Image (cartoon, grey):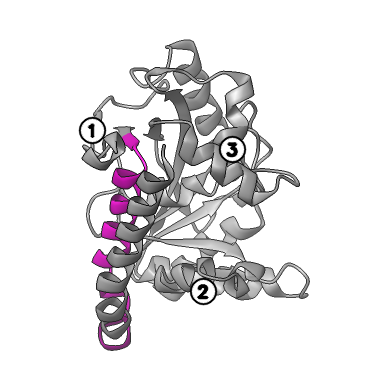
Amino acid sequence: MSRFGLACRVAALVLAFLVLAPPHWMALRLLGRRATLAPLLFHRVFLWLFGVRVTQSGTPPAPGEAALMLANHVSWLDIITIGSLRPLSFVAKSEIAGWPVIGALAGLQRTIYIDRQRRGATATVSAAMGHRLAEGELVVLFAEGTTGDGTRLLPFRSSLVGAARAALQAESGRGRVRLQPLAITYPRRNGLPVTRSERAEIAWYGDMELAPHLAAFVQGGPIDAHVVWGAPIAFEATTDRKAATAAAEAEVRAALRGLTAGGGIGATAAGVRPASTDLGLREPEVAAV
């Protein structure tokens, strides 16, 4: 990608933010959680500008159905990819709120922050997540607690899955909450399978520096992202959160294994009904500049 092409993309993304952010901020003040369209559009604009094609399979929650989504975590790109699918909010470490630009975007997404250094933070965040779920929202929790290199799945943490029980307590008439396993992978770049050496251009983990990583991301060419909605897990008042978390981890692991064994986008995990949807987020015309 030429510098001029990159500058055009960045300028278009800034313009999209300037158009979408002010009315979204006002809508949040007036409508609260019902103001959901702007983040969805912004994520889709980003994916279109930078040549990320998103496909999905499986059965997502019905419109208006609450779900605590337990996902694996590979990259910052996960947030944009998942955020392009449905109106939702994320759980993230509190440090992100102070990051330039990223913090502002996270705030507009109504991100729920957790301060890992503060005692009692888990209970506070679980209550906030439970309130969102009781209101019929989708909340995404990257259950590994950190990003991985995309080649293996780290153990899922169960501490914040208690938010599902908090949702049941907040709305006594609700009998169950949907736990939604979600697997995300980046199987292809430039139409070819991603090699181990190319994973660092997509995955962002450990102590990797952001600037070189972003440079490799924009120079590497179009990316295919695939999301699998795993078989949902019903969480009831008597459900063991550790057992439910382990079941979600197994579902995500099976989905990732199925995608790998099947050669990428066309495969789905056992128990997931194929319903592939291409969002049409392809390389824009400016890519030829």
Mark 1: amino acid:
Thr
The residue at 30%/37% (across/down) is 287
Above or below for 66 versus 276: below
The residue at 32%/74% (across/down) is 21
Q: What is the span of residues highlighted in magenta in the rendered image?
A: 28-54
Q: Tell me which label, 3 or 2, sits earlier in the chain.
A: 2
Q: Residues within 10 Å of mark 3 (few under 14, many from 20)?
A: many
Q: Is residue 16 visible?
A: yes
Q: Is residue 270 left or right of residue 87?
A: right
Of 151 and 204, which appears nearest the observer? 204
SS class of the residue under badge 1? Answer: strand
Above or below for 123 versus 27: above
Query: Which numbered circle lies on residue 128?
Result: 2
The residue that mark 1 highlights is 277
Of 15 and 117, which appears nearest the observer? 15
Q: Residues within 10 Å of mark 1 (few under 14, many from 20)?
A: few
Nearer the viewer's eye, disc 3 or disc 2? 3
Query: Which numbered circle lies on residue 171?
Result: none
The residue that mark 3 highlights is 203
SS class of the residue under badge 2? Answer: helix
Q: Is residue 67 left or right of residue 156?
A: left
Question: In the figure, residue 238 lies in which quadrant?
Answer: bottom right
Mark 2: amino acid:
Ala
Q: Is residue 194 magenta?
A: no
Spot occupied by residue 108 in the image (x, y as percentages of width and height):
40, 73
